[in-house]
Image (cartoon, rainbow, N blue to C red):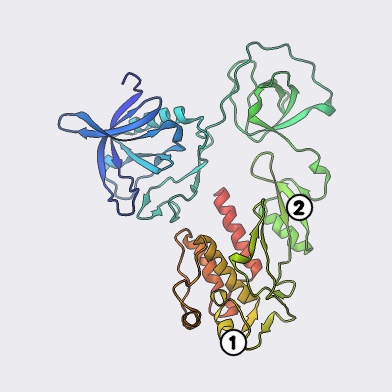
Amino acid sequence: MSDILLEEVFIKRSQQKKKTSPLNYKERWFILTKEKISYYDFDSEKMRRKGLKGSVDLEKIKCVETVQPEANTPQERQFAFQIIYDEGPLYIFAKHEEVRAEWIKKLKEMVRFNKELMQKYHPCFWVDGVWLCCQQEVKQAMGCKVLDSKNVSRKPLPPTPTEVQTPLEPPASSSILTVIAEYDYSPMTPQDLELRKNEEYSILEKSDANWWRAQDKYGKEGYIPSNYVVEAEKGLEKNDWYCKNMNRSQAEHLLKSENKDGGFLVRDSSKAGKYTVSLLTKGGGASQQYLHRDLAARNCLVDGNGTVKVTDFGLSRYVLDDEYTSSAGSKFPVRWSPPEVLLYCRFSSKSDIWAYGVLMWEVYTLGKLPYERLNNTEIVDQVSRGMRLFRPQLANERIYSIMSSCWSEKPEERPTFQEVALTVQDLLYELQYV
């Protein structure tokens, strides 16, 4: 192989692509070329490689990072690194830190322009069905650690102009375009201007599609790559509802203190050039004194923007005191009903909350029928005795705890819809930014 870039004998951990696959560690001869990384059987006695065992195309790699060693790890497995691609993590163990660093540096250099590079990764191993770093139990779960900015792969630089054109006179101030840097950029020529992520720059000239002449806040001018910046929004500061540097908790406190249904404000997002809208709503059907009584996945529609809308109000009732007792013989969805409905036909907003927990269960089981092995009579008996739906494979303990809180035996111990909404919002926020 004349195009070999690196080759080394490493210890490789089995990938356990099947649940029944054993966990083992074997020496493999790794070879890195411009197209792929391959590994072979290794004859330690004769010190030579044998048959090909597997390979990964470089264009499929999404992340290359170190892995923190497990407790009581033997010396030969102290210097681990991982290659993440479509089939999951490939764990490799180097003999020395210098060798590991060399391979990681070379691999990152070769995959830095890949289309599906990850922004988050798992710094610890996947062991026995759980990520040791964050305790998530889904192997495809989003990473829990953000890649260091110095290691994040960036868009490729535009081609360098064949010749630097004579700069034009800056346009009138009213026509100057303000942009925000999405990435750091270190000048490659004396004519370039340094970019710092999230800082604003004024564009003075756009005669070249790839390289624009810009000015930073200190008045320094130079050329910047046009695909490293985005246009900044204008004029939001003029509006009373724009709060530039307000964080999420401050926004919630302000809106709650105003206590105005439909009140909102706009604040800066943690992502450059983006904004977040915070909206106060005093609740849905429960706050309007309506009981839905048939909340289930079959009665939810999702529009093109991902907004979920509840439908089919055929069983809904308007109440004055958050409680409704139906007459004997009335029909109701048994599989989505709590004990007080099954035994006494007593509905409330807390019976709708129970149904919401079952709805969540439907989503995380990809549409399974609740209590699918039981008939209605058996469901009434078992649920009244304390039986609850099992934790879906796709739901971690945090998600399942939300479902379980909706299935408390006593209605007063179940959360309100507003409390559930805040819990879900906090969870989504943590998954996005932690």
Q: Is residue 364 left or right of residue 187?
A: left
- Regarding mark 1 in the picture, which secondary structure is present there? helix
Q: Is residue 277 above or below residue 102?
A: below
- Image point 80% across, 43% down: which residue? 237
Q: Are marks 2 and 1 in contact (CB under 8 Å)?
A: no
Residue 327 in percent (x, y) is at: 66, 88
Where residue 89 sits: x, y (%)?
39, 43
Q: Which residue is mark 2?
A: 265
Quarter of the image where the N terminus is located: top left
As drawn, 54 above or below 399: above
Which is nearer the eye, 404 or 247? Answer: 404
- Residue type at mark 1 is Tyr
Location of residue 182 by image quarter: top right
Q: Secondary structure at mark 2?
A: strand
Q: CA distance from mark 2 to mark 1?
A: 45 Å
Name the residue beneath numbered marker 1: 344
Considering every residue shown, the one lying at the far bottom of the view is 328
Q: What percent of the width, then of the height, locates residue 196?
A: 63, 31
Q: Nearer the viewer, mark 2 or mark 1?
A: 1
> Which comes before the other along the chain, label 2 or label 1?
2
